[in-house]
Amino acid sequence: MRWQLFLEPSDVLLFRDGRPFAAGEDHLARSLFPPTPFTVQGAVRSKALVDSGISMADYVSDNPAEKVQELRDRIGVPAKGYGQLRLLGPFVAQRNDDGTLTRYFPVPADVVDTGTGNYAIAVPLRGLAFSANYPDTLSPLWVRTDLPTKEARGWIAEPQFVKYLDRRTDFTVTRETELVHREPRLGISLDYELRRPTEGMLYQTEYLRLREGVGFLLEVDGLEPFKPPAGSLPLGGEARPAYYEVRQRPLTPLPRPDPLPARFKVVLLTPAWFSGGWRPRGGDWSKFFTGRVRLVAAAMHRAQALGGAYVDDKRRRDNFQKVMRRFVPAGSVFFFEAADEATYKEVPFTETPEDEGDFGQIGFGCVALAEWNYT
């Protein structure tokens, strides 16, 4: 059964990025917006565990009872997989006056700001007139304008995002400050034995204060809807409270061409991991498409360092160090050409390292697809 889960914070939230933050080593802890699928799957699975009445000790037991095994089949076991659970998202969303929700997506990396209040969409340039060091003969991106351009930043509401997918440029961009306020707070480590601050241990933590009605939306499958259908659960660092609301229907999919046009692009809505860094090793895209496709160009932001699975699988209760991996961030765009009829296999646009749970299963690699043409 597929259903929606909307998470709305009751207080400020903290979603740490992948950088180390240990006493005496660093002084600034930044927050990610939105949280990654790693964070949200943890909140969903923890809520399911608490509602089941099963203790953590029984849940990780080497000889689980039948009831425990049923739960493990549904939500998986830490460092070993996610069971039957399937998630899409999380997406930033805002509650409207009529109770509906509007999703927001990060501005794609092929959108440029012309400085006039209008935006333009970059496309691959046909036929290089100069030599360059692009890998696999990738084409540079080009915008037909005489105006100076710069990288566009912000978020696009779903109705405006559909305009972008239709290759229209009359869409509007929402500034991040209209959705969230970043709130830095100073702190200092305390020596409780001496009852005084510890010298040299001043630090700063960045919290997120979401605007009224703004939260995180995801689709859940493989798990019965939470009961009651509304309540509270801990979310993110310091287990800050968030209000949850169950909506008994799946997410409305974005429009998608089928079959794929001769030239199509894939826009990441959530981060993705690839064995070849920013692409599959060897440039083999057959996992995601039928037919023969060729990568023509790519537009992406700087890689995102995110935590993965527990390192110590044998005694995970004693070692909670996480593997940090470099992900292709949301908003990245891949431009393809199809040599014959091609279709998208409807699988998450991501790979997964060996011996880890399926990243696509918990929300990584959500995409939108659209047609493009040469400038």
Image (tube, rainbow, N blue to C red):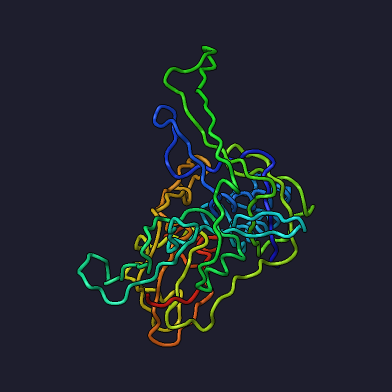
Please, is residue 14 above or below residue 256 in the view?
above
Q: Tell me where residue 64 appears, x and y as whole percent.
A: 64, 53
Q: Which residue shows up at 54% across the image and 13% down it?
A: 195
Q: Tell me where residue 92 appears, x and y as whole percent.
A: 60, 54
| Residue at the extreme left of the image, as rendered | 131
Please, is residue 18 above or below residue 333 in the view?
above
Query: 60 or 32: which is nearer to us?
Result: 32
- The quadrant in which the C terminus is found is bottom left
Q: Is residue 75 found left or right of 109 in the rendered image?
A: right
Q: Tell me where residue 249 appears, x and y as whole percent.
A: 72, 66
Q: Tell me where residue 47 appears, x and y as whole percent.
A: 68, 49
Q: Using the rendered view, name the quadrant where residue 335 is placed.
A: bottom left
Q: Which residue shows up at 59% across the image and 70% down it?
A: 254
| Residue at the extreme bottom of the image, as rendered | 340
- The quadrant in which the N terminus is found is bottom right
Q: Which residue shows up at 63% across the image and 49% down it?
A: 43
Q: Which residue shows up at 77% across the image and 58% down it?
A: 98
Please, is residue 264 above or below residue 38 in the view?
below
